[in-house]
Image (tube, grey):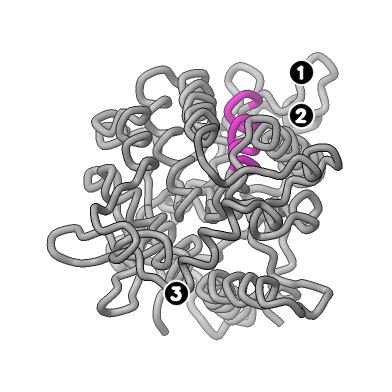
Amino acid sequence: MANTPRKAPAKKTPARKTAARKPPVSKAQARKPVARKPAKTAGTPTPGEARRMINLGLQGGGAHGAFTWGVLDWILEKTPVQIDGISGTSAGAMNAVALASGLHKGGNEGAREALDTYWKAVSRASRTSPVQRTILDRLMGNWSLDWSPGFMMVDVISRFVSPYEFNPMNLNPLKELVEEIIDFEAVRDCTSVKLFLSATNVRTGKVKVFRNAEITPDTVMASACLPLMFQAVEIDGIPYWDGGYSGNPALWPFFYETDTDDILLIQINPIERPETPKSAREILNRMNEITFNSSLLKELRAIEFVERLVKEGALDKDHYKQIRIHKIDGGEYLSDLTASSKFNAEWEFLTHLRDAGRDAAERFRDRYVSQIGVTTTMDVRGMID
């Protein structure tokens, strides 16, 4: 069974499951959990209290990645959990490298500042783009670019002309921005969080995961390379496209290379849509959503299958991990936005999504943070059936 959460052979001792380990507590502490003390700031551990560890799965989604920025910003500020590993794709990869570079140089506040700097730079760069909202959309408070002449022109061209034809010089302003804003040496040197960035091998169709020491501007751009918009990114002679086609995000590296069995998925691509798409643009958008979620659903199915077999005693729990899945779903905030809004990088829109992400993170903390390290809080079965 490919990529099932099987434990590595060398890790046979229970000590590997550090997500469940806690430092010894006194009887008084056991009688009254620290989280209930009124004097404690919400989500902030008291001195001597061990924070729960967690891995983060960050989906791609263009400008909608600002929602993920908000979730990360809230976690870094309130620190209800300790981040062990981050698997990111496309915009998720951008968020991941910004966080890691800032974290290495300035701790949590440095990471928050790096994320803020990155998204501000994205917004500034978009001011000269021909892809802008119409005056009517601005007046009506519509974040969509559906009727933007610039967006429609790019959309039509990309369907008939290859990026090798309309952009033979392979110019990509986003790469220049990433190279200027992100300290990749700090990303490679960062040991406090493990990074796993996904890209799709164009020749094999398989996912390629880049880790801290391998991460460069090219690996990040490979993870975000939409094939109708940009030429494939070549790394060591191998062409790569957006990681969303093969891992959005890839979860399996967490099973073998991190010290926690808890995964928090920050989902910005909806699994379900209640309406049947009718227009050509809606159909294409839904096709992309289904494609970009397929690899994730396969991994979730494998996790749920193994967990069920372990509980039934059909698999040895000492050799197979029981992965606990949690989710912060952006659907409530993003479902009314059309696909074109993923290209809207106005600062007002990005901060709107950031604030929505912070709100979603706080609501998750209030309901589920005590279950991290204890049990799955996401209805995995309902998601895959």
Tell which circle, 1 or 2, labels the residue nearer the N-terminal end. 2
Q: Nearer the viewer, residue 254 or 16?
A: 254
User: Is 148 left, or right, of 129 in this rendering?
Assistant: right
**Residue under the image location 37 percent in, 53 percent down:** 197
- Mark 1: which secondary structure? loop
Residue visible at 71% across and 42% down? 369
Percent x, y of residue 166 = 34, 61
Q: Which residues are magenta?
A: 66-78
Disc 2 element: helix
Which label sits in the foreground, 1 or 3?
3
The residue drawn where x is 54% and y is 41% is 53
In the image, 101 versus 10, the foreground residue is: 101
Which of marks 3 and 2 precedes in the sequence? 2
Q: Nearer the viewer, residue 210 or 56?
A: 210
Quadrant containing the N terminus is: bottom left
* Residue 301 image position (x, y, % from top left): 58, 78
- Look at the image and tell me whether residue 176 can be seen: yes
Establish if 82 lies above or below 214.
above
Mark 1 and mark 3 residues within 8 Å of each other at the beta carbon: no
Task: Identify residue for label 3.
Answer: 160
Q: Return the mark for residue 101.
A: none
The answer to whether residue 94 is above or below residue 336 is: above
**Per the image, is 69 magenta?**
yes
x and y percent of residue 146 in the render?
69, 57
Label 2 – label 3 distance at C-alpha = 58 Å
Residue 40, numbered circle: 1
